[in-house]
Image (cartoon, rainbow, N blue to C red):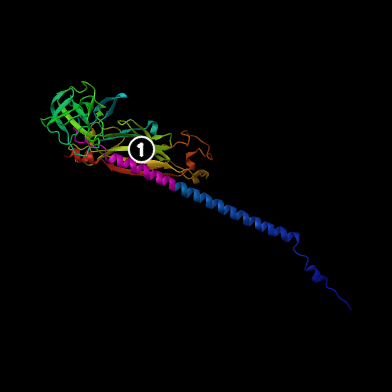
Amino acid sequence: MRTSSHLGCAGQRGLSLIEIMVGVAIGLVGVVAIFQTVALWTQHSQTTTSGGDAQIAGTLAIYNLETDLRHGGLGFATAPPTVMGCNVTATDARGAFAFRLRPIQINVGAGGGPDTIDVLHGNSSFFVTEQTFSASTANSKALRRRNGFRAGDLAVVAGNATAVPGSADCRLIEITNVSAPDGVTVAHATGAYTSAYAASGAASATARFNTPGSVTFTGGTIYNLGPQPVRNTWSIRDSRALIRTELIADAGGAEVADGVVNLKAEYGIDNTATPDGVVDVWQAAAPADWTRVMAVRIAVLVRSRQFEYRAGTNAPTPTAPTWAGGTFLMKDVDGGSGAAADSPNNWRNYRYRVYERIVPLRNMLWGGLS
């Protein structure tokens, strides 16, 4: 007799629709979990990468600025208060221009914005203290001794000082000859001359900074700045980059580090009755006596490129960053304020790094205590 089993046939009909739907749902949950993990990993990776970029930019910015500041005052740090800070006038093919004989000058940003910092230093290969002169013509000076001066050097001549700090009449001249037989006279004539820094057989140089009859006072002091003195201005451009502009050589602004959004600085002042080279007070205001500036403290604020929105106090930067001198004034990416909380323009939706240094002005320390 033939028999059949319906149960056996039922077991071979495959998966039901419900089982398929359950499997699809589990698969979708897995896919969502995978994509969320990938998205989170990508976000962390971008944050880490942008943080690394900010660290590189901040390191470059603070290193270059610190290096320049350490040279501040080279060539004129021994100047007395009546000369230090004087207004130096000069003339070249661009016309007349002027700068202050100060190792550094902090120009405080309006309304708490980024400061600008001017740094002035010479580059002579010789350490030359201030030299006095007593015999002077419109194109020569007889010094106490002319050791260290070479044809091609630029120098600041100061005279007619009163008791007021920085009151001296200061002029920038170009040394054109140091071969006078008396052993003490240096010339600053107009026209062509042979620079001591030119290669052998090179064509004669033309005095750039000398004008007829420009320096006529009969006595005073002279300071050797070497063949290529530097007067750099450090500033923030378009709320996004640290730039350096050179005045004397007439070099345009060069970008040093991208992502730098703020720059702050303060003078370290020795205000004891008898100067001892120790900083007693920090201030942003310019001092009355520039020989009392012993150090400068600086801070640069760097912003990462990665936009990260998290509401409220969970924002990447809910409050303004600070430095030793106070709190940074924060502005949105476009330089304004009041952007929507979730906007890529809102400054709070980015991470920041603060780089600070206290830079001793060694030339001022050595010159002021010598």
Instruction: In this rendered view, identify the residue nearer to me: 118 or 245.
Output: 245
Task: Kindly report the secondary structure that dominates the magenta region of the rendered protein.
Answer: helix
* Residue 82 picture location, percent across and down: 19, 29
Horizontal side of residue 302 vs 222, given as left or right? right
Instruction: In this rendered view, identify the residue nearer to me: 147 or 207.
Output: 207
Residue that appears at 35% across and 41% down: 299
Q: Which residues are magenta?
A: 52-80
User: On the rendered image, what quadrant is the C terminus found in?
Assistant: top left
Judge whether residue 275 can be spotted in this image: no
* Residue 104 picture location, percent across and down: 28, 35
Q: Residue furthest bottom?
A: 1
* Residue 313 picture location, percent across and down: 49, 45
Residue 97, above or below 328: above
Q: Is residue 227 magenta?
A: no
Residue that appears at 26% across and 25% down: 89
- Dot 1 corresponds to which residue? 264
Q: Residue furthest right?
A: 1
Give the quadrant of residue 93: top left
Hey, what amino acid is under mark 1? Lys
Instruction: In this rendered view, identify the residue nearer to me: 245 or 268.
Output: 245
Horizontal side of residue 281 vs 351, given as left or right? left
Report how many numbered discs are placed on residues in the image: 1
Residue 324, above or below 41: above
Residue 218, above or below 311: above
User: On the rendered image, what quadrant is the N terminus found in?
Assistant: bottom right
Q: Is residue 65 magenta?
A: yes
- Classify mark 1: helix, strand or loop: strand
Judge whether residue 314 can be spotted in this image: yes
Q: Residue furthest front?
A: 201
Q: Residue furthest left?
A: 182
* Residue 338 picture location, percent across and down: 50, 34
Characterize the local packing of mark 1: few (<14), some (14-19) or many (20 or more) Cα atoms within 10 angstroms. many
